[in-house]
Amino acid sequence: MTDNNQKVYVIRHGETEWSVSGQHTGVTDIPLTDNGRKNAKLLQPMLAKQSFALVLTSPLQRAKETCKLSGLGELAEIVPDLVEWNYGEYEGLTSSQIHKKTPGWTVFVNGCPGGEQPEEVGQRADRVIAKVRAVKGDVALFAHGHILRVLGARWLGLPAMAGRHFLLDTGTLNILGYYRGVPAVQIWNAPLFQ
């Protein structure tokens, strides 16, 4: 069952210390910064105007807290498939630190030693998309940068590695939907304003 009027609100969690420093934050469960919490609260008036058939969040605290501060925490179902990419040996490292070991590395092409490969993250995104498309009505997803970039690519039927083309800042609102029955991006990487 595909609801061609369905909108999927895709929300990347607010700022963390590691998102500011550029460290890869996969399964490390760190909290939002004060600025990240402030940013998450900006979602509340926008999302309060919507009615959601389903609200899903990553089990990691930065996504769950963003969901709660947005006003949707009571409705949220925790979905392990929305957890961030497992960076394995690259967890906590910046891209420049990784490039010293592996020049030209990109997570969307090369994956992570001791962690996940793009196809594995794509399979998780596909399971989330199947769950979303199985309901009638709008859906809100709270998760992380790389998994949501892959989810955006997979929504369009592109390979997981195409996520590299979807830039995604912390605390942004994105909307996936349909154009004449074809999966489409309606809004992507939209900043929140006070």
Image: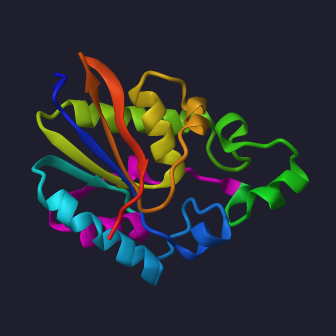
Q: Is residue 75 magenta?
A: yes
Q: Is residue 76 magenta?
A: yes
Q: Relative to 61, say whether 172 is above or below.
A: above
Horizontal side, residue 77 vs residue 112: left or right:
left
Q: Residue furthest bottom?
A: 34
Horizontal side, residue 131 vs residue 37: left or right:
left
Q: What is the magenta range?
A: 60-88
Q: Position of residue 79 (x, y in %)?
A: 32, 52
Between 39 and 122, the one lying in front of the other is 39
Q: How many tags in the picture? A: 0
- Which residue is at a point 38% across and 64% down the rendered structure image? 63
- The quadrant holding residue 58 is bottom left
Q: Position of residue 36 (x, y in %)?
A: 43, 74
- Which residue is at a point 70% across and 46% down the rendered structure image? 112
- Which residue is at a point 83% across and 41% down the rendered structure image? 104
Q: Quadrant of the C terminus?
A: bottom left
Horizontal side, residue 100 vs residue 91: left or right:
right
Q: How is the image coloured?
A: rainbow
Between 47 and 92, the one lying in front of the other is 47
Between 192 and 73, the one lying in front of the other is 192
Q: Relative to 89, say whether 194 is above or below.
A: below
Q: Position of residue 48 (x, y in %)?
A: 13, 61
- Which residue is at a point 19% across and 23% down the rendered structure image? 2
Horizontal side, residue 125 vs residue 180: left or right:
right
Q: Quadrant of the N terminus?
A: top left
Q: Residue furthest front?
A: 194
- The quadrant holding residue 163 is top right
